[in-house]
Image (cartoon, coloured by chain):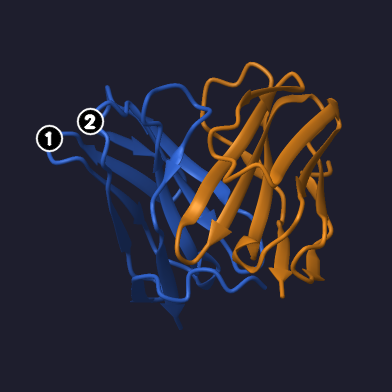
Chain colours: A orange, B blue
Amino acid sequence: DAGVIQSPRHEVTEMGQEVTLRCKPISGHNSLFWYRQTMMRGLELLIYFNNNVPIDDSGMPEDRFSAKMPNASFSTLKIQPSEPRDSAVYFCASRGTGSNTGELFFGEGSRLTVL
Amino acid sequence: GESVGLHLPTLSVQEGDNSIINCAYSNSASDYFIWYKQESGKGPQFIIDIRSNMDKRQGQRVTVLLNKTVKHLSLQIAATQPGDSAVYFCAENGSGGYNKLIFGAGTRLAVHP
């Protein structure tokens, strides 16, 4: 079975450009999470969705960041405009419907470099 | 792969030895704890979890110990193998539930033949 699929795996862009990261969760999972990982701050939860509805976006750093989940099989994280401090690895994760554990299934991440 | 974790504390062990990775958590309200393993270039992968009504839980070659008195968590790996080389993260649930896990900084485990 395919796991969580993220694209692109790597992106290099210039400051001010728009960045869109994409995620396809595991089929049947109803919770989706976006995390950011940096050396300085570790793994941080940005936002999570239940049944395609954003539940908590308190981790989104500022208005330049936005996330959507138009359907159960697709989510995007957008940064506009991007800044060098946004350079990080962005992970998408999903969790199974009815799960009563914290087991998240992570994708392989999108490594973003903003010059 | 991604270069996160270059300055993480590192535990070096010989293949076949047992490994113990420690974690101090911060929130007294946390009642659920979980360990993840992250290999280079990959996302974190679930290893084992434990609830606060337990002080020990065993999996395959792994054991998690919880000491709520001193807010300490440990992961023991028996007969460590080269494939165990990775960064290990503990996480706690903070205000409850399973949606807002708070991850620790991580420990790098290096297994030498």
Tell me the crowding category of disc 2: few under 14, some 14 to 19, or many 20 or more residues within 10 angstroms, Cα based. Answer: few
Report the front residue among A113 and A89: A113
A49 relative to B34 in the view: left or right: right
B111 relative to A78 in the view: left or right: left
- Report the residue that reaches farthest toward the bottom: B113
Under mark 2, the amino acid is Ser
In percent of width and height, residue B59 lies at 44, 41
Q: In which quarter of the image is the N terminus of chain B?
A: bottom right
Under mark 1, the amino acid is Thr
Q: Residue at x 53, y 20 (%)?
A: A100
Q: In which image quadrant can residue B93 be found?
A: top left
Find numbered disc 1 in the image and state the secondary structure of the residue it sits on.
loop
In percent of width and height, residue B75 lies at 34, 51
Report the front residue among A56 and B91: A56
Find numbered disc 2 in the image and state the secondary structure of the residue it sits on.
loop
Q: Name the residue under label 2.
A: B28
Q: In which image quadrant can residue A115 be found?
A: bottom right
Any mark on residue B69, and which? 1
Chain of the residue under the numbered disc 1 shown in the image: B
Report the front residue among B63 and B88: B88
Please say if A14 is above or below B97: below
In percent of width and height, residue A64 lies at 69, 47
Q: Residue at x 80, y 30 (%)?
A: A69
First in residue order: circle 2 vs circle 1: 2
Task: Say how many tags the image has.
Answer: 2
